[in-house]
Amino acid sequence: MLHDRPSMRVEKNDPLYLQAERVFSQGVSWKNEVPENGSPSCFSVEDGSIKLQEGMSFEESWSAFFFESFNRQNSQQFEKVLEKGSSLSREEWVRQNAHLEYEASQNFLAFSDTVLLPYFRTHSLDTLLLEDLHRNFSQDFENWMKAPEESYPWNYWGKFYDENFSK
């Protein structure tokens, strides 16, 4: 991963490297591909891999990697929602997937508070991305779901539903 995404390069004794080792030891793999959906990152339920867009900054790349590692923790639940497919309404499909991502975001933010933000600050790196994520995900799930149809999570999960399950 560090070879494929040069902006992420750190030394082997770096705290981020050591955290990434823990992630990979839990069955996550790296795939040197960009997400097909245009998002900055994705976790594949099918093969357990994380993919990251190219050209992201150090802060964006590491944040996306660790977020997807928390998304992976919900992979079995994502699979169950996927199996339900068109038996769910579009709204219920979006809500169930979004709730899993919301849970991952809460875990990621706790990790960010204890690992990423202190690391970024110590190394004089940009913390704006993480601060924006805190603002976005600090609201409760129901308020977060009131986002307009053209924004996340509706635009991503709704599009997936429309392309795969609409009749």
Image (cartoon, helix red, strand yellow):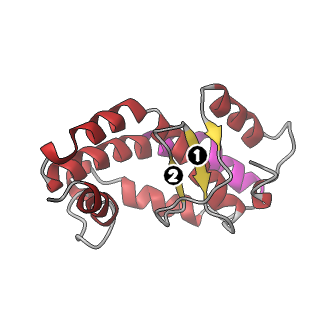
Residue nearest the viewer, comparing 98 with 111? 98
Circle 2 residue: 42
On whether residue 152 falls in the magenta region, the answer is no
Residue sitting nearer the eye, 156 or 166: 166
Residue 157 at x, y percent in the picture: 30, 57
N-terminal label among 2 and 1: 2
Foreground residue, 156 or 113?
A: 156
Is residue 128 visible in the rendered image? The answer is yes
- Disc 1 crowd rating (10 Å Cα; few below 14, some 14-19, many 20+) is many
Q: Residue at x 60, y 28 (%)?
A: 27
Q: Using the rendered view, name the quadrant where residue 41 is placed.
A: bottom right
Residue sitting at x 27%, y 50%: 140
Is residue 134 rendered to the left or right of residue 83? right
Residue underneath mark 1: 50
Residue 123 image position (x, y, % from top left): 78, 55
Report the magenta stretch's main SS: helix
Q: Residues within 10 Å of mark 2 (few under 14, many from 20)?
A: many
Q: Does the magenta run of residues contain 115?
A: yes
Tell which residue pokes out farthest to the bottom in this image: 150
Is the residue under label 1 in contact with that under label 2 (CB below 8 Å)? yes
Is residue 112 shown to the viewer in this render? no
Dot 2: element: strand
Amino acid at circle 2: Cys
Question: With 158 as the anchor, is 63 left or right in this view?
Answer: right
Stretch of the chain drawn in magenta: 107-123
Horizontal and vertical percent for residue 105?
43, 46
- Three-letter code for the amino acid on which mark 1 is drawn: Ile
